[in-house]
Amino acid sequence: MIKPEPPRRATIYEVARLAGVSHQTVSRYLRGERLKPATREKVDAAVKDLDYRPNQLARSMRTRRTNRLAVVLPMPSTFPLRLLSAASATAHKADYELELVSVEGGSEARSDRVRELAESGRVEGILSLASLDEDIGSTSPVPVLTTGDYDDQMRGLGLLADGSPVVDVIEYLVSLGHQDFLHVAGSQSWASARNRKRVYLETIERLGLRSHGVVDGNWSARSGYDAIVDLPDDTEVTAVVAVNDTVAMGVVRGALSRRWQVPRDLSVFGWDDDEIARFATPSLSTIAIDREAQGRDAMLRLIAAIRGEPVPESGVRSINRLVPRESTGRPRQGPAPARQG
Amino acid sequence: MIKPEPPRRATIYEVARLAGVSHQTVSRYLRGERLKPATREKVDAAVKDLDYRPNQLARSMRTRRTNRLAVVLPMPSTFPLRLLSAASATAHKADYELELVSVEGGSEARSDRVRELAESGRVEGILSLASLDEDIGSTSPVPVLTTGDYDDQMRGLGLLADGSPVVDVIEYLVSLGHQDFLHVAGSQSWASARNRKRVYLETIERLGLRSHGVVDGNWSARSGYDAIVDLPDDTEVTAVVAVNDTVAMGVVRGALSRRWQVPRDLSVFGWDDDEIARFATPSLSTIAIDREAQGRDAMLRLIAAIRGEPVPESGVRSINRLVPRESTGRPRQGPAPARQG
DNA sequence: CTGAAAGCGCTTACAG
DNA sequence: CTGAAAGCGCTTACAG
């Protein structure tokens, strides 16, 4: 392994000398200020000649702007990579670099890390992909956007979690004839899970339906599996609203273990439109989410906050789409098949 | 939206003044050099008093070390987040920050971006999660590790792609009685896909088995689906080695569309151990990968290269584990069921 | 429109 | 073991 020479880059002084101007003039050139055309040309030639690129570090030090944002990734998680990627691309487009900070543990651990980061002066804004303590928004010296809550905590910024599509899911199931529901929720430390559960309960109430339980799961397939296995023999549930596709897969699996067929004996609805769920058997009815739009959206809002511009409305409501597939159908008539033996 | 006051942090000079020493002494304190105990105590108190944290930017500017690494994320991709997270945690543990760079497009686009990044002086090393042009390793001023190739290109660093578990997969299927195989490969621009394909062909050859084709797919479930649907009516294939779980799900789905049962009429083997595949029906036999170990491994190797230390062997071979599940069984006797009609 | 001076907050020699 | 000087590569006033 050869340790390489540190790259030797031209400085603003060398460019100035080659162009026959002062380095201040080069600085103006770099920042796009007015120069006499003849001067500009000379500088331009020198810059090209030396393949000069300004030292961002020196610039940041002087301007006290780092042009850097941080994204906080909770771990473990199954966060969609596409969201992260869109956030990254959007940041770069606005000339920000993106620092990736992965944090194990719960929202306390994340919050500590975010506080430290916010006070370090290293970044101008922070996007957290999971909930934080509620007071961070008001005490942080830089804007913090979180996907974990969407009221006006967090300086009014957060909003990736949105339970409203649950309404569409339930109305769709009702249109098939369902009246008896079960919800397998996600971990209640997540706002998205709380939102979906809340909207589920509200909608059941509002439409005069019957909910036969809300199981607080942990986003895992196993939690879906267990929820079904634990259902009593005489359950009236005909439709399950699962908090995501993974859980829905577990639900299907649990149903099969009871010799129930999906959707003949039980309709199952997922969330996320994972590719693999499209090819599952049965394929999963689900909510398709435009992750790119989501990541872009979040980053644009963060950048607006940093710049002190009015923060745009989140377009979250328009990025969810209901996709009916094989796992949902008309409700069975009468009781579900009994257990083996 | 209130634009916050820029955070005002104490400088090394203020600490020095409060402690009654020179700022050079504080600098020594920060770098852990020897100080007279009495001096150290004074500085220590002042640092705590002012909640002083050194400005990394100024330090970097002077030392010309940025303490930053970049990770290049190809898009679109389904790269495991856990790998990214482990890479991030490992980098932080070694006092590096991690810059996330997401790049759309093929290896040319990525390579351009990596070259630019390497020459920018902003980062000390780069981990690319997908293949790059082969010459980058030798021309880059900073170490570049890629997951895309694992020979001694790339300054001998790369190595996340490893086809060797394919041997285990085939031997396992042979132990069940299979002799007639099909491989649905991944996109051949990925070294991991090329490796698996190569090892598949070698193993078939070595063990005197029959391969009834290699389908060059694109990592999608559809490619698996199509591969099966396109098989002739009288195919002798009894086992499919899919390049990953998603493709395997498509293979299962394709089999069902021909009224073949899995594994009765066809055994299907996946790769990745996606959680959702564990709960698929049938559950997928697969290769479980320790993504955390993989990410950690890659980052440790990159850091070693940066420090000019001998680069440790990759532990990749030990992080893959064969997990047999329901999608594989003994081969059928005689032909597979004919198509409908 | 352009140049000479000062300074961002550190670290690295160089003295003592 | 500690301090005074210089400098990393820029930008921001201040003159002209």
Image: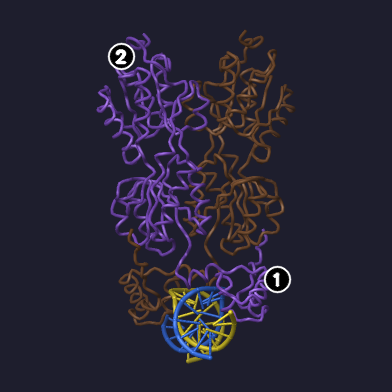
Chain colours: A brown, B purple, C blue, D yellow
Instruction: Point out the image quarter for the N terminus of chain A.
Output: bottom left
Instruction: Point out the image quarter for the C terminus of chain A.
Output: top right
- Residue A150, image x and y in percent? 67, 45
- Residue B297, image x and y in percent? 44, 47
Local secondary structure at mark 2 = loop
- Residue B238, image x and y in percent? 34, 18
Identify the residue shown where x is 44% and y is 61%: B123
Callout 1 and callout 2 share a chain: yes
Q: Residues within 10 Å of mark 2 (few under 14, many from 20)?
A: few
Relative to B172, A303 lies left or right:
right
Kindly identify which residue carries mark 2: B233
Q: Amino acid at mark 2?
A: Asp
Q: Chain of mark 2?
A: B
Q: Residues within 10 Å of mark 1 (few under 14, many from 20)?
A: few
- Residue B156, image x and y in percent? 32, 51
Kindly identify which residue carries mark 1: B49
- Which of the 4 image quarters holds residue B195? top left
User: For this rendering, which residue is in front, A50 or A41?
Assistant: A50
Local secondary structure at mark 1 = helix
Q: Which mark is residue B254?
A: none
Relative to A2, A90 lies left or right:
right
- Give the label, 1 or 2, closer to the camera: 1
Relative to B204, A272 lies left or right:
right
Label 1 or label 2, whichever comes before in sequence order: 1
